[in-house]
């Protein structure tokens, strides 16, 4: 990947597309005779420039967690964050949010922020027509908002960094700031906990936004790395913030 710290997003070499969850989602549909809820007001537009900076200033980090929620790993990540008093941004896949609304609401209740990571995590988004990009972004926004009980995602992160000018402008018009990253922990590759920790420490000079994952396979290395990194970052004097809006 090309480093997002340089202001350039990256596209993963291989396509990774999540399979939609089958069956009725946790939220359910209103039964016969139920009164329809009024549509939520549209979110105010935000900047379409890809965000990297932290709202806590220069000596701060933004912890971002991608691809969930996952019934095994998201609760463990939430526990580590809680133990260290850290708030994070969770970039959720729409079908995962739809399948696990209880976890989405736990994330919100703990004070973390939500981010739209598309419906199906297609890392070739930037090669697809605008209609497809719109469906992936807007449908995921709807899925996440419904699963959360009405809390909208505040950011949009393209899978694999596959942003386009169109997708950035579309997300921004829906109140979701495009979100990049500066430090890729490489936890998705499961290189070992020590390697994840070393990568983050070695790349912190690139900028504040750090990428981790809570789904897509065994994330025990991610959880263990966070156990080590969060106290270390505090010891180094870093504040924990959210990406700028």
Image (cartoon, rainbow, N blue to C red):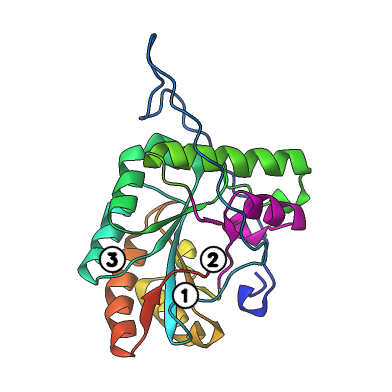
Mark 3, residues whose alpha carbon is within 10 Å: few (<14), some, or many (≥20)? many
For the point 36% across and 59% down, the residue is: 112
Q: Between disc 1 and disc 2, whose residue precedes?
A: 1
For the point 28% across and 58% down, the residue is: 78
- Depicted 169 relative to depicted 136: above or below: below
Q: Which residue is nearer to you in this view: 181 or 105?
A: 105
| CB contact under 8 Å: marks 1 and 3 | no
* Residue that badge 3 annotates: 81
Marks 1 and 3 sit apart, C-alpha to C-alpha, by 18 Å
Secondary structure at numbered mark 2: loop
Secondary structure at numbered mark 1: loop
| CB contact under 8 Å: marks 1 and 2 | yes
For the point 49% across and 64% down, the residue is: 189
Q: Give the range drawn in magenta.
A: 153-181
* Residue 215 x, y percent position in the rendering: 42, 52
* Residue 91 x, y percent position in the rendering: 48, 55
Q: Which mark is residue 245?
A: 2
* Residue that badge 1 annotates: 55
Q: Between disc 1 and disc 3, whose residue precedes?
A: 1
In magenta segment, residue 29: no
One can see residue 78 in this view? yes
Mark 1, residues whose alpha carbon is within 10 Å: few (<14), some, or many (≥20)? some
């Amino acid at each position: 990947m090309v480093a997002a710290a340089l202001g350039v997003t990256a596209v993963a070499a291989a396509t990774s597309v999540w399979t939609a969850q089958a069956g009725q989602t946790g939220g359910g549909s209103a039964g016969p005779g139920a009164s329809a809820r009024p549509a939520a007001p549209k979110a105010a537009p935000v900047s379409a420039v890809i965000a990297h900076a932290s709202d806590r200033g220069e000596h701060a980090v933004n912890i971002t967690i991608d691809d969930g929620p996952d019934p095994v790993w998201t609760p463990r990540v939430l526990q580590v964050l809680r133990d260290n008093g850290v708030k994070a941004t969770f970039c959720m896949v729409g079908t995962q949010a739809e399948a696990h609304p209880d976890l989405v609401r736990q994330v919100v209740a703990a004070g973390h922020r939500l981010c739209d990571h598309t419906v199906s995590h297609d890392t070739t988004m930037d090669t697809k027509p605008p209609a497809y990009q719109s469906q992936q972004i807007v449908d995921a926004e709807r899925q996440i908002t419904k699963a959360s009980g009405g809390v909208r995602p505040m950011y949009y992160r393209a899978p694999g960094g596959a942003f386009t000018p169109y997708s950035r402008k579309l997300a921004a018009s829906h109140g979701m700031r495009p979100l990049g990253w500066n430090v890729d922990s490489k936890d998705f590759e499961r290189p070992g906990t020590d390697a994840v920790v070393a990568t983050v420490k070695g790349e912190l000079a690139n900028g504040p936004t750090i990428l981790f994952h809570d789904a897509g396979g065994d994330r025990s290395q991610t959880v263990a790395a966070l156990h080590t990194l969060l106290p270390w970052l505090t010891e180094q004097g870093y504040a924990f913030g959210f990406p700028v809006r």
